[in-house]
């Protein structure tokens, strides 16, 4: 059965972005083996989402039939975004590390899709994720090195995403790192080449 792939790009560097280069490559390779799958692209830099504010929360908490016209528009946009996430079978995220964590544009998206009663719920036994049927691929880019080094404790980018998607019930989370991208052109090229090999191997395994 065809699947729906949601590609999310969060780099502010436009065409110079390495994470966008990696998500593009990932999607091209995915399409070459699963041509019938539907790809949805969401660029949260060119089309930024609002930070959650009282107007958005007020719209969501007001019953549909009591909303003002403005609240209806706000709630519709919010629900559309949530539905897009719920409909996706696979998420492919291009995520640069910004100041040890994820870009704020991506955090704004997360604040829209982490919704009690929809993507998680609190029970007597504690919180339970409601979207366990998804796969997540994170293509992570970083100026320095963190993975498997003492710097690892400063990583609040991938570790945060693992916590968040785990909280939503998703267990199948695969990470591909391209690190040291700002050390030198040589290190960057090596790191990107290694990430490209990892993309190829990951997708070959997924297709097997
Ligand atoms: C605002 C900003 C903050 C950054 N903070 C970090 C950081 O904390 N650690 C790091 O290793 N690299 C940091 N970098 C470097 C980026 O992670 C690196 O350039 C990466 O390639 C960005 O991904 P992109 O090429 O897809 O834009 C930062 C870059 C920017 C623009």
Image: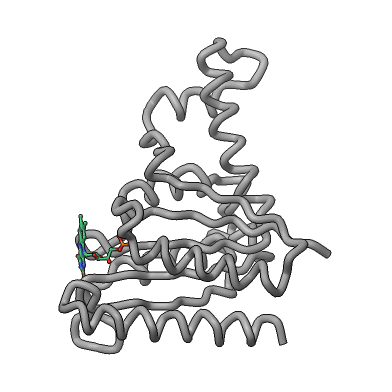
Picture quarter with the N terminus:
bottom right
Quadrant of picture, ligand 1: bottom left
Visual colour scheme: one colour
Q: Determine the image quadrant of residue 155.
A: bottom left
Q: Residue at x 65, y 50 (%)?
A: 86
Q: Position of residue 105 (x, y in %)?
A: 36, 46
Along the line of sight, which residue is nearer the eye, 37 or 91? Answer: 37
Along the line of sight, which residue is nearer the eye, 180 or 97? Answer: 180
Q: Position of residue 43 (x, y in %)?
A: 46, 47
Q: Is residue 51 visible in the rendered structure shown here?
A: yes
Q: Is residue 16 above or below residue 87?
A: below
Question: Image check: 105 left or right of 199?
Answer: left
Question: Image check: 108 left or right of 112?
Answer: left
Q: Residue at x 44, y 55 (%)?
A: 9
Q: Is residue 151 above or below residue 93?
A: below
Question: Image check: 146 left or right of 55?
Answer: left
| Count of numbered labels shown in the rendering | 0
Picture quarter with the C terminus:
bottom right
Q: Is residue 94 above or below residue 40?
A: below
Q: Position of residue 85 (x, y in %)?
A: 60, 50
Q: Position of residue 41 (x, y in %)?
A: 55, 50
Q: Residue at x 62, y 45 (%)?
A: 84
Q: Is residue 152 visible in the rendered structure shown here?
A: no
Q: Determine the image quadrant of residue 26.
A: bottom right
Along the line of sight, which residue is nearer the eye, 40 or 171? Answer: 40
Q: Residue at x 39, y 34 (%)?
A: 50
Q: Determine the image quadrant of residue 45.
A: top left
Question: Image check: 124 left or right of 196?
Answer: right
Q: Is residue 41 above or below residue 93?
A: above
């Amino acid at each position: 059965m065809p699947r729906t792939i949601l590609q999310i790009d969060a780099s502010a560097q436009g065409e110079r972005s390495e994470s966008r280069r990696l998500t593009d490559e990932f999607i091209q390779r995915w399409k070459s083996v699963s041509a019938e799958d539907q790809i949805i692209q969401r660029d949260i830099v060119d089309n930024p989402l609002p930070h959650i504010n009282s107007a958005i929360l007020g719209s969501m908490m007001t019953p549909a039939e009591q909303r003002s016209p403005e609240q209806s528009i706000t709630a519709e946009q919010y629900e559309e975004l949530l539905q897009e996430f719920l409909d996706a079978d696979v998420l492919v995220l291009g995520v640069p590390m910004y100041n040890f964590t994820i870009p704020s544009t991506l955090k704004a998206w997360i604040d829209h899709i982490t919704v009690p009663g929809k993507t998680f719920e609190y029970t007597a036994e504690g919180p339970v994720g409601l979207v366990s049927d998804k796969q997540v691929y994170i293509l992570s880019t970083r100026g320095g090195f963190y993975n498997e080094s003492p710097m690892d404790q400063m990583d609040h980018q991938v570790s945060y995403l693992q916590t968040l998607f785990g909280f939503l019930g998703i267990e199948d989370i695969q990470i591909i790192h391209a690190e040291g991208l700002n050390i030198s052109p040589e290190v960057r090229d090596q790191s990107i080449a290694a990430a490209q090999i990892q993309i190829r191997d990951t997708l070959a395994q997924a297709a097997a």
